[in-house]
Amino acid sequence: MESGDKMYLWAKELFPITRSITGEGVRKTLKYIKDNILDGLHIHSVPTGYKAFDWEVPKEWSITEAYIENETGEKIVDFKNNNLHVLGYSTPVDKWVMLDELKNHLYSLPQQPDAIPYVTSYYKERWGFCLSDNQMKSLKPGKYHAVIKSNLKAGVLNYGELILPGESDKEVFLSTYICHPSMANNELSGPVVTSALAEWLMTLTNRYYTYRIVFIPETIGSIVYISKHLEHLKNNVVAGFNITCIGDDRCYSFLPSRRGDTIADKAALHALKYIDPQFKKYTWLQRGSDERQYCSPGVDLPVTTIMRSKYGTYPQYHTSLDNLDFISPYGLQGGYDAVKQAIKIVDTNCYPMVTTYCEPQMGKRGLYSTISQKGSGGDTRLMMNFISYCDGTKTVLEIAEMLDAPYNQLFDIFTLLLSKNIVKLKR
């Protein structure tokens, strides 16, 4: 099975689960990933009330049933039909109300009349339902029975963590989130692409860096994780990628770290330039995902984001229209390939240094024609240009940018030269 098809299958199986920042849906999602993809995934629990900087882990939320029925007993809104129908973290309710009062607890999108919006209220207790604006407008005056069988109690926040040791203790950090209910690009694409990347990384026998991979609830999860590992992350992470909105096939997008000049930024930009020269480049001021926490002042991790259609830029975002039809195996494969290429650049990038003074004698090594005539040497021009910059002060990536050549092509040249003892590796 191709990687894109495999990731899409995972997304289909995870799609129905009701996820939030806490609760059984998160645990089911993490268990699926652990049981079916990443056996080494460790699932952690952080109790309600845990203080993480300026934040606190909220109560755990669970829900079993929710609906609105009219006076004839017809269920006109039913959580069983779509888990976006309930305001996330809604408190329980079971009462009859008049339409005017009910409307104070209803959420719709007049500009997208057929879409059910995704709405949450994590840190202020309220109850509510979400429905399409067309459905909202069809409600007739009268009494309605609003029922939400939910529970807010002291519990835990869960996250998953996988650490893959490398030759170096320095780390590459991958983060994605698992708190969204049934939406595909935001956010099942992130967890399934991250799972596939972790699966690939586990097959490598020559990882240079250690890989730290986390599956967390957005915002509160990243803040909690940072609070538990701040000094380690600051001292060890050399590059990081926040993986989100990476499953559709409409475009590629890039959002930089706050610094904008880290190896993660440079690797992502180089990878995207050769995958899709027309990729959309955003600025730090257009941030909106967990890079907000990872790059915040005092944390300052080198974390950047490669996406397909960026969150908040497509009309299906945070609605029921972000369904399995919005993503595709092709889109997931493309997102996976882009992040994989950026990771490969980070992991293999090094400072090549030529081992001789003046140009090495390439002919005796079978790397250059032994007959010199007009036009000879053209095929090896890129190789000789590469060697000319191998002074131990520039990385393969920096030389690739200087020569306007794909990193993969130059790394193949570097590997060949290394095998001939023409250059040596310097980290």
Image (tube, helix red, strand yellow):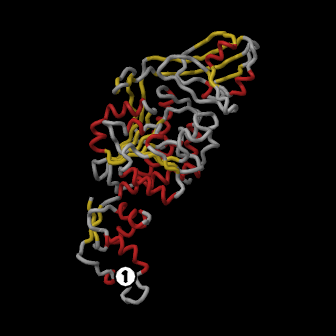
- Given residues 50 and 15, the one toward you in this image is 50
What residue is shown at x 42% (from left), y 33% (from top)?
A: 159
Residue 80 in percent (x, y) is at 64, 26
How crowded pointer 1 is (Cα within 10 Å; few <14, some 14-19, many 20+) is rated as some
Which residue is painted at 36% across and 23% down in the image? 50
For the question of whether residue 203 can be seen, the reply is: no
- Classify residue 393 by image quadrant: bottom left
Looking at the picture, does residue 219 appear above or below residue 47? below
| 222 is higher (above) or lower (below) than 263 | above
Residue that carries the numbered disc 1 in the rendered image: 368
Residue 427: where, in percent of width, then height? 27, 58
Q: Position of residue 21 (x, y in %)?
A: 47, 28
Relative height, residue 181 to residue 90 (above, below): below
Relative to 89, 213 lies left or right: left
Secondary structure beneath dot 1 equals: loop
The residue lying at 48 percent from left, 25 percent from top is 23
At label 1, the amino acid type is Tyr
Answer whether residue 182 is visible to the viewer in this image.
yes
**Where is residue 34 drawn, in percent x and y?**
45, 39
Q: Is residue 353 left or right of residue 312?
A: left
Q: Nearer the viewer, residue 313 or 79?
A: 313
